[in-house]
Image (tube, helix red, strand yellow):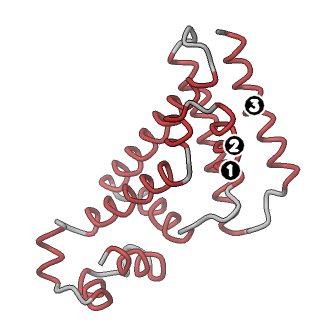
Amino acid sequence: MIQAARTAFADNGFHSTGISQIARSSGVLVGQIYRDFANKEAIVAVIVERDLEDFLSERGLSAAGAAGDPDAVRAWIARFVACDKPEGGRLVAEIMAEASRNPRIVEIVRGVHDRMRRELQAALRLLVPSTVSPEHFARVAGVIETIAGGVFQRRLTEEDQPGPEVIDALMECINASIDKLQAEG
């Protein structure tokens, strides 16, 4: 059912997708969907949370953090920023557009950003002495998240942009911010 909802939201948009359409596509009865989810926003919340969990755990930030591997953390950040293949791009774009109109979706998106920021801060702590203030970790995590978000948005419409030289320049900025944190410690 979740996969059917993902596909329908990506193909038709949030407003043009009804619960009955998700039910038809998934083979799940409308009543069962409403027993499991209060509304479409609740379905979006599950989609977003699952995607974030997969992204953080399966792709290595949590694993790099748990292993205490600073090189793996920097490599994960580089992959995150490069966003070579924006998976689920249309769905993410639809969710972000809906977040500009729907307070419940804004809540969901903010929760995702907060979790991403916490995970980034925890990973950055592996690279930097513990004497650095939490505000500085938060600032660098915000820079990384913002740059990656911009690259992702650009790649939705121009798959090959920004080019490698721009990604390298962005990573130079991020690495300089991380190096500055290390110097503060």
Query: Which residue is labeled 2 in the image?
Result: 75
Amino acid type at image mark 1: Arg
**Helix, strand or loop for disc 3:** helix
Within 10 angstroms of label 3, few (less than 14), some, or many (20 or more) residues? some
Query: Which residue is labeled 1 in the image?
Result: 79
Q: Earlier in the sequence, mark 1 or mark 3?
A: 1
Q: Residue at x 30, y 54 (%)?
A: 104
Q: Earlier in the sequence, mark 3 or mark 2?
A: 2
Residue 30 at x, y = what percent? 17, 83
Residue 3 at x, y = what percent? 38, 77
Within 10 angstroms of label 2, few (less than 14), some, or many (20 or more) residues? some
Label 1 vs label 2, nearer the camera: 2
Query: Which residue is labeled 3 in the image?
Result: 175
Q: Are marks 1 and 3 in contact (CB under 8 Å)?
A: no
Real-space Cα separation, disc 1 to disc 3, in angstroms: 13 Å
Horizontal side of residue 60 vs 101, given as left or right: right
Where is residue 69, by image quadrant?
A: top right
Q: Residue at x 44, y 53 (%)?
A: 52
Front position in the image: 77 or 96:
77
Q: Are marks 1 and 2 in contact (CB under 8 Å)?
A: yes
